[in-house]
Image (cartoon, rainbow, N blue to C red):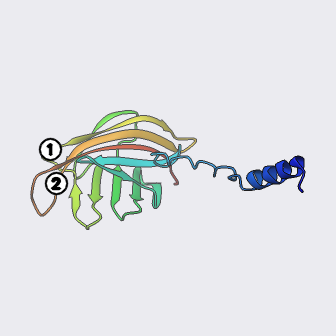
Amino acid sequence: MYKPSLLFALALILFTSCSKDKDDPVTPAPTNTCGVAGARLQANLDGEAFCANASLFASLAVDVLTVNGISQQGATLTLELDSLDVGTHDMTEGTNSLLFTTTLGLAYRTSDGDPGSVTITTHDTSAKRIQGTCSADLYSPLGGAPKAITVNFDLYYIE
């Protein structure tokens, strides 16, 4: 006959050997951050978010800063900034212009008849870093209602 201590030991081994392994570590939820400090171009076009998370560059040539960003979905945002001094400046088709192309290839741009604004909050020429915001109504060359855009940028640029 079996001893009670042997039966207890077998039961203990049976129940403890089938215990659940440790839980899988919890993966943190992705953040809604666009870019990093010094490499950020984000916008909101009529309630739709844009983040230049596929490609981003900023280049200063002949006193014009050209910025281009492409989202992973294929939308593009291009800025040509003529006014680089800290402060608020008009944004039109010919000066401080903005061009946005949707994922479907529809283009919207700033207009001379309805200027927007660009605000340069900081511009460090020795570090080649510029930060600011833009807001404007963009118009399609095909017509239709304008689309409101707000843009935030924090960029290092090359010369």
Q: Nearer the viewer, residue 58 or 85?
A: 58
| 156 relative to 114 in the view: left or right | right
Q: Secondary structure at mark 2?
A: loop
- Residue receiving disc 2: 139
Q: Amino acid at mark 1?
A: Asp
Query: What numbered label is drawn on residue 158?
Result: none
- Res 59 visible: yes
Residue at the limit of the structure toward the left, as seen here: 144
Q: Amino acid at mark 2?
A: Tyr
Q: Secondary structure at mark 1?
A: loop
Query: Could you tell me residue 123's position as x and y percent?
Result: 47, 37
Instruction: Name the residue at 30% across, 64% down.
Output: 103
For the N terminus, the image quarter is: bottom right
Disc 2 crowd rating (10 Å Cα; few below 14, some 14-19, many 20+) is many
Q: Nearer the viewer, residue 25 or 127?
A: 25
Q: Earlier in the sequence, mark 2 or mark 1?
A: 1
Instruction: Name the residue at 30% across, 46% down.
Output: 44
- How far apart marks 2 and 1 lie (CA) works out to 9 Å
- Residue receiving disc 1: 114
On screen, residue 107 above or below 151: below
